[in-house]
Amino acid sequence: MNVKRAVGQAVFCAVVTISAVAGAVDTKNYAGATCQPVGGAISYDTIGRILNPSTAVVASTICPIVRDDASGAGASWTAANMSVIDQNPAQGFSCSATSRTPNGAGGFFSNASTGAAFVGTATIPFAALGKFPGGYYAISCRVPVRTAAGASSFLSSYRVTEPNPVEP
Amino acid sequence: MKNLRWKALLGIALVAAVVWGLTLFSSQGQPEDGAAISTRPREEEQERLQRELKALQSNVQAVRREQAELAQTLEMRRNEAGPPSVVLDGGSKTDPVAASEPPPDSSEAIAQVTEQLEQRLGREARDSRWASQVETELVRSFSGDTFSGSRVSRVTCQSTLCRAEITHDSGDSQETFVDNLPFVLEGKTGFFRKSDDPGGEPKTLVFVAREGAPLVTEEDQ
């Protein structure tokens, strides 16, 4: 009886381990403060978010992604999204994810936005793209202006899940 | 009887004297013999060490010769490759050997994607209503103030895919176009490829997928 129980437990553990390995993914979460300004002004708050302090000019940012799987086969990611707080009822976040060749001469892109009238917290998802050997990924976003009432919109964080786990 | 006893005692004393003498003789001779035995391996050891030292010295000389030859070969290769093109901020030049691993060449991959999309577009039947509408939208999107240095040469849509050829006044116009391209195609997925003709007019080829349709299908991959 004890032997049967031990064998059963061993089989259960093996199944759980195999399932965990088979379903392993490579997810990274980035603070919004990782993004760099490329147009307009960007401010950083003390909890890792970025915001547009201007009431007149939409800010542009580029958010880098660490690519672990540098091969050229399959999809770029299984999930990629940007978490934002949009407090401008007249402008929305517009973000584009890109997967490019090493020299940037070509690539895939996917655009998504919150919509101009949206106000609130949103997660902007990006479609999976193709990829190139040794190429790079990035997400660029346009951050709405601060409202006349002083309400700023925040780019809080972003997350990318690559399909192939990389052995340490 | 008394005489016999003395004789026996004398015999015993004589035997004892002989034994003592022999013992003394052997104890005096032994160290000399032992010393003689131990000096032989010491000399052999010294000879062996000297032989090893000579071998090591010749090895060191061989390694130095090899190092000099390698340095000479490296210098020749550096001269053949020309001066390194990258100069770091501090002014020190990058080592061409260390920097010799270039990023993978993706020109073949990008040509393959372009070919797949061209073939797919060629296979699709035209959804006239959608195609006409999106063709007009794309021309309008690519003709705004943002793209002042760019002109749409040709736009073709079928049922799930569109293809546009853009000509640019300059490389800067092309960069502006490529940077802003995704933002004028809100909610869409696409692919672009800059022309690879260095002396020619800058051109960009763009493919845009219909909303909800994948850009690269599993059949393509």
Image: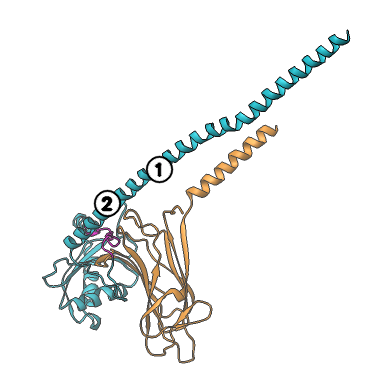
Chain colours: A orange, B cyan
Give coordinates of residue A146: x percent, y percent: 44, 87
* Chain of the residue that carries numbered disc 2 in the rendered image: B
Residue B50 tag number: 1
Q: Determine whether, in the image, residue B76 is placed left or right of residue A74.
A: left
Same chain for mark 2 and mark 1? The answer is yes
Q: Is mark 1 on a helix, strand or loop?
A: helix
Instruction: Name the N-terminal-most of marks 2 and 1.
Output: 1
Identity of the residue furthest to the front in this view? B3
| Residue A48 visible in the shown view | yes
Q: Is residue B80 above or below residue A32?
A: above
Chief SS of the magenta region: loop
| Numbered tag placed on residue B65 in the rendering | 2
Q: Nearer the viewer, residue B198 or A138?
A: B198
User: Outermost residue toward the top?
Assistant: B1
Residue B100 sits inside the magenta stretch: yes
Instruction: Measure the alpha-carbon separation of dots 2 and 1.
Output: 23 Å
Instruction: Please tell me in which quadrant of the rendered image residue A97 appears.
Output: bottom left
| Mark 2: amino acid | Arg
